[in-house]
Image (spheres, rainbow, N blue to C red):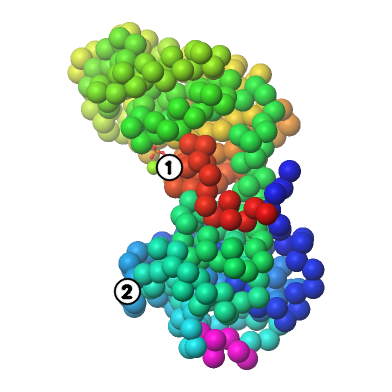
């Protein structure tokens, strides 16, 4: 099934210089890395390459310097932290191409690891400029892309390099592609998709693509309100995109033609104000929402129906929380359904793949992220994949 090469195809790489595109774009506060998830994701690939005697040269973007050398966006700021995560010395090289970089890496020995400076310090990075591609390629013998999260961009370090050096998917990239293939490429049926979150407008393409692909489309979150309203339900003062009624109806229509069952909630959790445990909190049928109430979560009967549907499914793709999960008790439906999906996954009856910034936070909050088959931390790239788009960084790896 894999149409791309992996580290298994490398052969003897002792002393070979391997340019590895990783995502070291980590969040920082007061000079400290606040979340090292992305750093840890690089470990299997970097450790394996170094152990096999490669000279490992890491390429990454960091922030949005837009072609300018910005000291506050220098990868020198994360090198010490990365060293700590990797557990071996890491050299910082103040350029990612050209003579300075070449001179800096010339004396590196098999097993050594270096971080090259922010690729976006060059305007050519985001333009996929062939000259920058050549400049970076001159530093390496091989190219490994391990940054799925940047694969939706056709940049010099994410796409260009794959055309001029022998190109391989790193271990994190490989795991991501295998999981995504299982989820929507050639999934075991029936397939369910959960699409939640705030707005329909941000996920129109996702919905359009999914209705043709999945057997059950579960709509929750704020976007369920738009669909309910389109069907004539009065959603009170809920977050709702009334102007999208025609599009919502179009999507419901397309689903019907494709034999995709759309699940909208029967009951909802509402309150008059958006606050934690508000006094006006109540659960009601979707037809009983008062004019001064807003829907902030789907209700327990809806969750029960969804649990029943999931029990008969073999595959689940999940993007977007079912309610305003940051504020209790509007996390209840998301937490419950996530726990049911995790249990089905652990029992072997369900392949579950989830992604999206807030979705990852919600699954962590539910304590189930490590019991799903795969949770993608790639935001934009995951959504574009859910839209059915080809990702340039992935396409360039295919041979
Ligand atoms: P992701 O980042 O996983 O793609 P989104 O950004 O689309 O997800 O949506 C997440 C946001 O949607 C959360 O901040 C959540 O509070 C909000 N949300 C979910 N349901 C509702 C609702 N009924 N009303 C208002 N906001 C909601
Ligand atoms: Mg989000």
Question: What secondary structure predominates along the stretch shown in magenta?
Answer: helix
The residue that appears at 65% across and 58% down in the rendered structure is 169
Q: CA distance from mark 1 to mark 2?
A: 31 Å
Q: Which residues are magenta?
A: 101-107
Residue under label 2: 68
Left of 47 or right of it: where is 67? left
Quarter of the displayed picture in which ligand 2 can be seen: top left
Q: Does residue 1 show up magenta in the picture?
A: no
Is residue 189 depicted above or below 319 in this figure? Answer: above
Q: Is residue 103 magenta?
A: yes
Left or right of residue 377: residue 10: right
Residue at image coords 42%, 33%: 205
Can you identify the residue that label 1 sits on? Answer: 358
Residue furthest toward the front? 130
Quarter of the image for the C terminus: give it. bottom right
Residue 202 pos. (x, y %)? 36, 36
Percent of width and height locating residue 64? 35, 64
Question: Does residue 154 appear left or right of residue 140 in this picture?
Answer: left
- State whether residue 183 is above or below residue 212: below
Location of residue 87 in the rendering, given as x and y in whole percent from the top left corner: 63, 74
């Amino acid at each position: 099934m894999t149409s791309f090469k992996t580290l298994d195809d490398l052969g003897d790489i002792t002393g070979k210089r391997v340019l590895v595109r990783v995502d070291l774009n980590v969040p920082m506060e007061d000079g400290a890395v606040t979340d090292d998830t992305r750093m840890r994701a690089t470990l299997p690939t970097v450790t394996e390459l170094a152990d096999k005697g490669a000279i490992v040269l890491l390429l990454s973007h960091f922030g949005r310097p837009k072609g300018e050398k910005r000291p506050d966006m220098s990868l020198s700021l994360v090198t010490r932290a990365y060293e700590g995560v990797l557990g071996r010395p890491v050299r910082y090289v103040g350029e990612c191409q050209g003579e300075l970089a070449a001179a800096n890496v010339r004396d590196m020995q098999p097993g050594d690891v270096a971080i090259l400076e922010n690729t976006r310090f060059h305007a050519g990075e985001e333009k996929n400029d062939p000259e920058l591609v050549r400049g970076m390629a001159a530093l390496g013998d091989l190219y490994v892309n391990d940054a799925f999260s940047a694969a939706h961009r056709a940049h010099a370090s994410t796409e260009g390099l794959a055309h001029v050096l022998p190109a391989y998917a790193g271990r994190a990239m490989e795991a991501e592609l295998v999981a995504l293939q299982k989820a929507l490429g050639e999934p075991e049926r029936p397939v369910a998709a959960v699409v939640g979150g705030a707005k329909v407008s941000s996920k129109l393409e996702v919905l359009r693509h999914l209705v043709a692909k999945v057997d059950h489309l579960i709509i929750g979150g704020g976007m369920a309100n738009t669909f309910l309203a389109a069907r004539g339900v009065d959603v009170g003062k809920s977050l709702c995109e009334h102007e999208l009624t025609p599009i919502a109806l179009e999507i419901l229509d397309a689903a019907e033609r494709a034999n995709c069952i759309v699940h909208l909630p029967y009951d909802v959790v509402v309150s008059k104000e958006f606050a934690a445990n508000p006094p006006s909190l109540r659960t009601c049928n979707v037809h009983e929402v008062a004019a001064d109430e807003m829907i902030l979560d789907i209700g327990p009967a809806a969750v029960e129906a969804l649990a029943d549907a999931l029990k008969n499914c073999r595959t689940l793709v999940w993007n977007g929380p079912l309610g305003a999960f940051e504020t209790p008790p509007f996390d209840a439906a998301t937490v419950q359904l996530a726990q049911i999906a995790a249990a089905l996954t652990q029992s072997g009856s369900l392949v579950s793949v989830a992604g999206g910034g807030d979705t990852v936070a919600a699954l962590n909050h539910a304590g189930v992220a490590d019991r799903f088959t795969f949770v993608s931390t790639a935001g934009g790239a995951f959504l574009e994949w859910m839209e059915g788009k080809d990702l340039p960084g992935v396409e360039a790896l295919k041979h």
